[in-house]
Image (cartoon, rainbow, N blue to C red):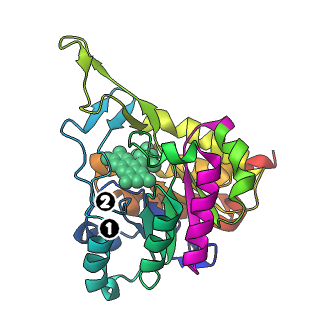
Amino acid sequence: MELVTKISGITLRNPFMNASGVLSQTVSLLKRLQEAEVGAVVTKSITYEERKGYENPTFIKINCGYLNAMGLPNPGFREFLKELSLCRDEFKVPIIVSIAPSEPKQAREMATTFKNIASAIEINLSCPHSEKLGLEVFNDAKLTESIVKNVKDGFDKPVFCKLPPYRNEVLGIIDSLDNCDAFVVSNTIRAMKIDIKAKKPVLSNKFGGLSGKALHPISLALVFELYEKTKKPIIGVGGVESWEDAVEFFLAGASAVQVGSVLEKKGITIFKELVEGLEKYLKEERISLEELIGLAHDS
Ligand SMILES: Cc1cc2nc3c(=O)[nH]c(=O)nc-3n(C[C@H](O)[C@H](O)[C@H](O)COP(=O)(O)O)c2cc1C
């Protein structure tokens, strides 16, 4: 079965990609992902200046998924660009560069800088645990709009907005994000865990983002609702651990699917599993991937 798919004009050999930040922090990790049958690679979110990230513990398993508060550690956009430029030609799949800007001018400069490297820019408007970035930007509608506009002005290829999983806020803002090309749904949910013996939060940052199993039905519901409100392509992300989880996202209306936390559990071989599972399902159901997308809305 044909799995080639298009998102805003970018051709993907299959509809699966890694989610930003999980096993994608360095260029060598991105190269490993490419070997694992991904349709595209997504970088860790890059900020204007270097960020060291938070102290450990930054990533923990809990009984319904994972909590992380990494603090967006990254070398800053100039350094990252240098690293990526050195091996751009080794990438045979599209590179989606995730940026986490906090203001419009910097956002535009970052986007322009990655012009010759990235096939698309994904703007992180949703990280739930970093000051003046991600969700804090998203909570300021005017700032968000201006950042998206500046990225669009500085970058002549597709721009994706990565949204938080909060339904009302997302549905309230999407019309003003009209100039972006696709939505990535969703980032993690702000959450925490408390150690009852130590009597204090487990993550060094206290709050983090909940990912994995518990997030899946929440992201799925938002993809479903968003599909009825926008004509833009949607990339589903949240708690995908099997091809069946991914098929749910396609049925809800996602054109592609990203996977994050499961990479910690199953490693990058999950992509082969997803590709083979989807191919077999499409063959058995005698439908194409294109026909599958949004099909749950017809019933
Ligand atoms: C360790 C870790 C680091 C992450 N870093 C980023 C990041 O840099 N940028 C971003 O947009 N999302 C980041 N995320 C969120 C994921 O990209 C994804 O949206 C979320 O984990 C839900 O997908 P999952 O349930 O498959 O993990 C991170 C998630 C985890 C677990």
Residue 88 figure quarter: bottom left
Write down the residue under mark 1. 33
Report x, y in % for residue 253: 68, 54
Badge 2 vs badge 1, beta-carbon distance below 8 Å: yes
Report x, y in % for residue 188: 46, 41
- Residue 203 lies, with reference to residue 78, above or below; the image says above
Amino acid type indicated by mark 2: Ile
Helix, strand or loop at label 1? It is helix
- Residue 198 lies, with reference to residue 3, above or below; the image says above
Q: Quadrant of the N terminus?
A: bottom right
Report x, y in % for residue 222: 64, 42
Amino acid type indicated by mark 1: Leu
Q: Is residue 165 magenta?
A: yes
Q: Residues within 10 Å of mark 1 (few under 14, many from 20)?
A: many
Q: Residue at x 63, y 66 (%)?
A: 149
Task: Return the mark for residue 11.
Answer: none
Helix, strand or loop at label 2? It is loop
Left or right: 285 in relation to 91: right
* Residue 128 in sight: yes
Left or right: 266 in relation to 248: left
Write down the residue under mark 2. 268
Q: Residue at x 52, y 57 (%)?
A: 257
Left or right: 113 in relation to 250: left
- Residue 289 lies, with reference to residue 94, above or below; the image says above
Of 62 and 142, which appears nearest the observer? 142
Farthest residue to the bottom: give it. 89
**Does the residue tagged 1 have its C-beta within 8 Å of any atom of ligand 1?**
no
* Mark 2 vs 1, N-terminal side: 1
